Amino acid sequence: MTARQAYDLYRDGRMAEAAALCERVAADDPGSVEAWHLLGAARLALGDAASALAALDRALALDPVRAGVLSARAAALVALGRDDEVLAASEAALARDPDNATVLNARGVALRRLGRPAEALATYDKALAASPGFVDALCNRGVALSDLGRFEQALAAHDQACAAVPDHPQALANRAGLLMLLGRPVEAARDLERVLARDPRRPRALGDLLYARRQVCDWRDDAALLAAIRDELEAGRPAIGPFAALSAFDDPASHRLAAGLAAPPPAPARVWPPRPPGERIRVAYLSADLHDHATARLMAGLLEAHDRKRFEILALSYGPDLGGALRERIDAAFERRIDVRRLSDAAVAALARDLGVDIVVDLKGHTQDGRPGILAHRAAPVQVSWLGYPGTLAAPYADYVIADPVVSPPGAEADWSEAVVRLPLYQPNDGLTSFAARPTCADAGLPDGVFVFACLNNPAKITPEVFAAWTTVLRAAPGSVLWLYEGSPGAAANLRSHARAAGIDPDRLVFAGPAPHAEHLARQTLADLMLDTWPYGAHTTASDALRMGIPILTAPGRSFASRVAASLLTALDLPELVADDVESYVAAAVRLAGDPAALEALKARLGRAVRNGPVFDPAVFARRLEAAFEALYARAQAGLPPAGFDIDPV
């Protein structure tokens, strides 16, 4: 029984046996550097980074300068996310072995996670100079280039990684992610199919494939993918990312499972001293979207309406600086906007603490570019999830979620790890503003004199079940067309094909391309009735339509993501547009298409509610949200744990 025998097992990929043998060797000979070193390497390969580090520390105590131990220890620290320690460990290892590509790669990973992508890129380049075909460094180099916004170079790096090791799952998955970012979901799906052929349980690959295909309404194997994803989630495996899960299932329990598997682990708890009385409550909004983005369009009026006598309003922004009028307006509404793009999650949290932030409001959650790790490091005594991610973060460091009685009805508290704060309406909206001139039907490619059903959601929200309901409506309303957003290349062709298969003339589907926001608002007035999707419905798209006086018909499910249009319609006192089920949804659409007087009466009621009610009054929303902020701040100052409550209309 020797360390050499254990090494032979390790070399053959028999990690559990190698680890067990190393444990016996180390027990018999606690001074064996080789046994502790190999035990650490085997445990790391088995995914147990914490016990790997303990074994490697034993080896390092016996031989503080052994290069292989230093290298393995750096890798274990990377796996544990202890990035500052990775830098120190890698410096020690590189002092002994300056061209160690594995250590250089580990150092690059830590630098990237610490918000230093340019340094990470230079470090990956050093690793590749030492080992030109090192696929891990090639993969990571592509990610660093993407972080720096050098997307074409990033794609070339991913191509190089895929060429170096064909069908390498990480290389293919990285390239698929970038292709999605570049709006090329068909190519992304092909890469993901190859990933799953090689590694059927690759984390998120099933969900990413479903999401990529749905971008272009490619519904091949849709039901089978959903079933496989659900089985994996229930087994505790992360088959789908949290955001993709929202559009896959109308099931808050599945959403919570997916989010919990993705949530970063919490940092140690902190003790927060009470603030002196009489000071303003300091609120920091955390987002990547404080520019011309749906989130900023919803929030602009609210930010301007905040009471500066009671609140100090800050922005912790980690999104791009794209300029523009909305960006300027948003910037003017904050007392301070701090760019934290190049700071690590831990550093952003530390900055917020240094600033004395009382309440951090995370506007991203588990969405693209979201950084829940900032909350994991405890940026403030009170941490709130709101607006950007319509589901639970499933994490102990998210104290509250802002909701309302429709998106999260009383009794739905089990859907949330957060305490639920219900405003009368969870979604803010800007005030009524000017928009572009109304186009003609010909401008939009719509025929004159027909009833226009519309859904200008992202086509990825259109499921086979939703489209089946729409084709039923079109068959029952022959003098009508369906106006859709064209989305990614290929979506329109696939939808026309689905229509043909359902017996609907494909020419009855009309597609709208991208347009500036003011023009997009104006063209919506050409629609007669908006049709919502499920299980992920219209959110900003719904309030845009309602703002322009166009009713939206919805069939809410059980999840927050499916209930936003219902929330808006309830606030506007238009409950007849909230269908109890799909059959009622279809019947209501057909009825309104055949009853112009009833539709005009609905539009008149909608117009009055929009002009005279609170839904599009940012000042009213600000007072409600501020009442919530004061209540949860008071609880924290009193040393009380988070607890849900409702804010009454004001």
Image: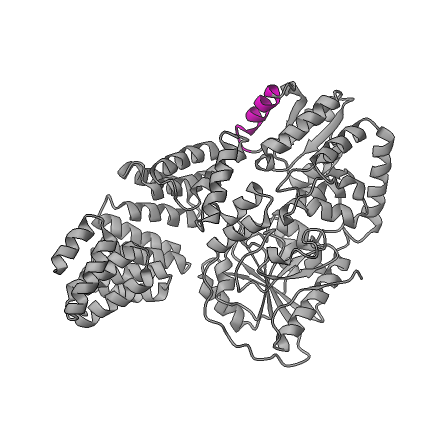
Residue 247 in the image: x percent, y percent? Answer: 57, 42
Name the residue nearer the viewer: 611 or 414: 414
Name the residue nearer the viewer: 416 or 56: 416
Residue 53 in the image: x percent, y percent? Answer: 29, 65
Q: Is residue 369 above or below residue 489?
A: below
Furthest residue toward bottom: 276
Q: Give the quarter of the image for residue 452.
A: top right
Q: Is residue 190 left or right of residue 136?
A: right
Q: Is residue 567 visible?
A: yes
Q: Is residue 548 visible?
A: no
Q: Residue at x 69, y 52 (%)?
A: 427
Q: Is residue 327 left or right of residue 302?
A: left
Name the colour scheme: one colour
Q: Is residue 71 left or right of residue 260?
A: left
Q: Residue at x 50, y 50 (%)?
A: 258
Position of the C terminus by quadrant: bottom right
How many numbered discs? 0
Name the residue nearer the viewer: 578 or 619: 578
Position of the N terminus by quadrant: bottom left
Residue 336 in the image: x percent, y percent? Answer: 59, 65
Q: Is residue 413 magenta?
A: no
Q: Is residue 499 magenta?
A: yes
Residue 290 in the image: x percent, y percent? Answer: 59, 53
Name the residue nearer the viewer: 58 or 381: 58
Magenta region's main secondary structure? helix
Q: Is residue 210 above or below residue 478?
A: below
Q: Give the quarter of the image for residue 276.
A: bottom right
User: What's drawn in magenta, residue-wise?
Assistant: 488-501
